[in-house]
Image: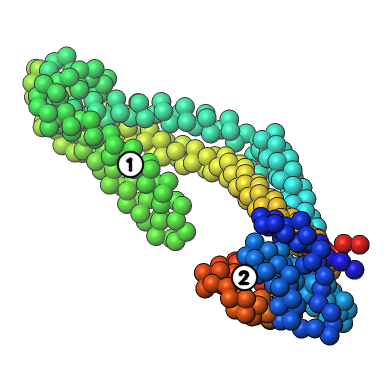
Amino acid sequence: MALKNIFSTKKPDNAFANNLQPVIQQPPPVTRTYQQWGLTQAGNVDASPNALMPCLQATYLAICNTIAANKALQTQRKIPVRQKIAGLDADNANIDNEIIAAKDKMALNDNKIKQLSDEISQIKRNPEEVTGDASAKASFWIGIIIIALLTVYLFVFYSSAAYSAFLKNFTEDDTNIMNSIFDAQAITNAFNSGFGNLILILTIPAVFLGLGFLIHKFSEQENKSKYYKIAGLVITTFIFDCLIAYHIVAGIYSIEQVGSFQEMPDMTVGMAVQQINFWLIIFAGFIVYIIWGFVFDFVMIEYQKLNKVNTAIKNREKAIKQCESACNGLRCQIQQLQTKKNNNTGEINKLNIALAGIIVYMQDVAQDINNFFTGWLTYMQGAGKTQEQINECTEIRNRFFTSIPQHQTINNNN
């Protein structure tokens, strides 16, 4: 068996170049040492530096042939290689199982995404399955319209009523209750009388709108104190309404009192509550914002029903995103596993090549190469070669060692 020459050989440039290869290709006889062979080879080429590198290469190949012939050594060295191949094969088998498991998880997530998408479509088609009320959407928008109209009414009513009660100077034309309550010039007149008056007129409606909102918020509480809170608010705002109504009725009465030909007593609270106009003002305001509060509470209940639909859809959309994110992670995992498997397969192929070749370590050849070079130097010293020539050959030997890997596999050449 012979081995391929793994080094590029520089051809000698002296006169014996043509006859060099037959001389250096012969390995040393078994009865001779590499040192003796180095001495012989140096003598054959007169220790020419140009011939040293080919001689070192030939010696290296001769050593490798000797190592290749040692079957027991090669078998021993290939045991770790076979073990590593077995380990990589086992790792690839585990990787295949992990890839199958990841693909199964992806299939489950894909099925879940499809199921959630179908549920979203079903909820949009039949929202009553979530709300339990097929008319929730219609009821909500009807309530919104009513709330909007009542809000405009209450703003107009209380801004006008507040202006009439606190700022207006009644005239003979204001004896009509409707003209007294609904004053079209209330905001303009309040603005003309001062910015503070304008703010008062604009913000008073918020007091009564706030009552309706608080009734809704207190009704959401579960303790019994909510009823006392609601009753207290209603009573307080009712008293406030009564004061407004009294001021308006008293203002109208004062005009009638001045213009009457008969003596009329001063207005009292008892007289005020006996007048229909007093209760007309109360019911035009107090009852309306109580209704506003109940309608607002109804709208919020319907909104909560609709919000259940939106929440149900959003929860499913969130679950879909989580499944999609999981699928993306699984795809990356599969890609990484496949890359690892490919790397393992590439390593297995390299190791199989090593099994088919000859495994050579640096320590296998270093001593014999040095012995060969010792014989070479012995000849140079005996032949009277200069130190410069010896140094040149030493440099060639060192360069040769740097070209030899610490561990390599050499293919057989059958």
Residue 376 lies, in percent from the top left, at 66, 76
Q: Residue furthest top?
A: 173
Label 1 environment density (alpha carbons within 10 Å; few <14, some 14–19, many ≥20): few
What is the three-letter code of the residue carrying label 2? Arg
Would you say 245 lies left or right of 342 here? left
What is the three-letter code of the residue carrying label 1? Gly
Which residue occupies the foreground of this view, 117 or 387? 387
Q: Going 58% across and 30% down the picture, which residue do you hit?
A: 138
Quadrant position of the C terminus in the picture? bottom right
Residue identified by numbered label 1: 210
Residue 24 lies, in percent from the top left, at 77, 67
Are the residues flagged by discs 2 and 1 in contact, CB closer than 8 Å? Answer: no
Colour mode of the rendering: rainbow
| Of marks 2 and 1, the one in the foreground | 2
Which residue occupies the foreground of this view, 203 or 248? 203
Is residue 304 visible in the rendered structure shown here? yes
With respect to residue 267, does 325 lie above or below? below
| Numbered circle sitting on residue 255 | none
Tell me the quarter of the picture where residue 263 sits: top left
Which residue occupies the foreground of this view, 203 or 120? 120
Is residue 260 visible in the rendered structure shown here? no
Residue identified by numbered label 2: 397
Numbered disc 2: secondary structure: helix
Which residue occupies the foreground of this view, 408 or 84? 408
Residue 411 lies, in percent from the top left, at 82, 63
